[in-house]
Amino acid sequence: MPSAIRPPVPNPPAAVIFDFDGVILDSARMKTDAMVDLFGARNGPFEAAVRQTVWQNGGLTRTGSIAVLERGVFGREPTPERVAELAGRYAAMVDDAVKDCPLIDGAPELLRALDGTPCHLVSGTPHRTLLDTVARKGLGGFFVTVTGAPDDGTPNDKSAVFAGLVATHAHRAERTLIVGDSLTELVGARHIGAPFAGVVPPDVPDPFPAGTAIVRDLHGLAALIGVG
Ligand SMILES: [Mg+2]
């Protein structure tokens, strides 16, 4: 964990970069449950380790997450064939189900209140799948850019994506708020010197390092940044 300066949460921010699953869409729990079931780990000795690893690597692509789980939790060398097979099964489990997930409480109100503030969406979900879900949820108009993972399965490094967005759109990093639900986004925010706010479901203990600003839903974020 980089221990660089932590800029305070700007009120209001000049720009906002949102993660998608668990931040805009209430889909993180469903996707983590699917990963647990993909590995047959439900109620078994590896369940907690799978959940923790998914959280720590929340910004990874699905193939990246599967490889990390294979190696880190189950001690198996992830062959490309095994990863591809598991990724296919995972896609079948989540890509339709995600369309039925509700938005995080306060998401529409916050996004409307941020009208005029550039908002970006960055996700580890494959780009086409992400665009499809964003369109189905009627959210496309709220974001200046939407960035998923490359469709060929190569990982997108969130730190690099954040840095690219800030540079391309001439946002001041210290006034650009990064909003995420996993460690990956916090690390990415630190990497570019941007402030961070974590979204933690109301019934879940706060997993972020002490001192991290967190909200329980997006009504809470609207209050934190003074919009709406
Ligand atoms: Mg997430």
Image: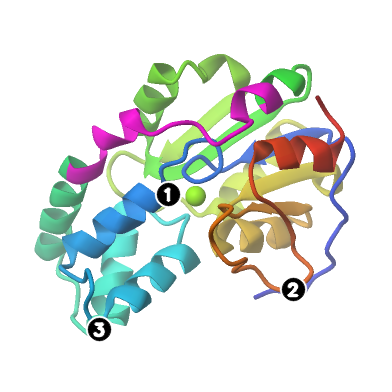
Secondary structure of the residue carrying tag 2 is loop
Tell me if residue 132 comes above or below residue 174 in the rendering: above
**Left or right, residue 62 beside residue 124:** left
- Looking at the rendered structure, the secondary structure element under dot 3 is loop
In this rendering, position of residue 207 left or right of residue 119 = left
- Residue 210 is tagged as 2
Under 8 Å from ligand 1: the CB of mark 2? no
**Mark 1 beta carbon near ligand 1 (under 8 Å):** yes
Q: CA distance from mark 1 to mark 2?
A: 22 Å
Callout 2 crowding tier (Cα within 10 Å): few <14, some 14–19, many ≥20:
few
Question: Which contiguous range is marked in magenta?
Answer: 93-110
Using the image, tell me which numbered label, if any, was put on residue 102: none
Q: CA distance from mark 1 to mark 3?
A: 22 Å
Across and down, in percent, residue 130 comes to 39, 32
Q: Secondary structure at mark 1?
A: helix
* Quadrant assignment, res 227: top right
Q: Is residue 177 left or right of residue 137?
A: right
Q: Amino acid at mark 1?
A: Ala
Q: Which residue is mark 3?
A: 45
Q: Is 103 covered by the magenta stretch?
A: yes
Establish if 14 lies above or below 175: above
Dot 1 or dot 2: first in sequence order is 1
Numbered tag placed on residue 28 in the rendering: 1
* 221 relative position to 156: left or right: right
* Disc 2 + disc 3, Cβ < 8 Å: no
* Amino acid at circle 2: Ala
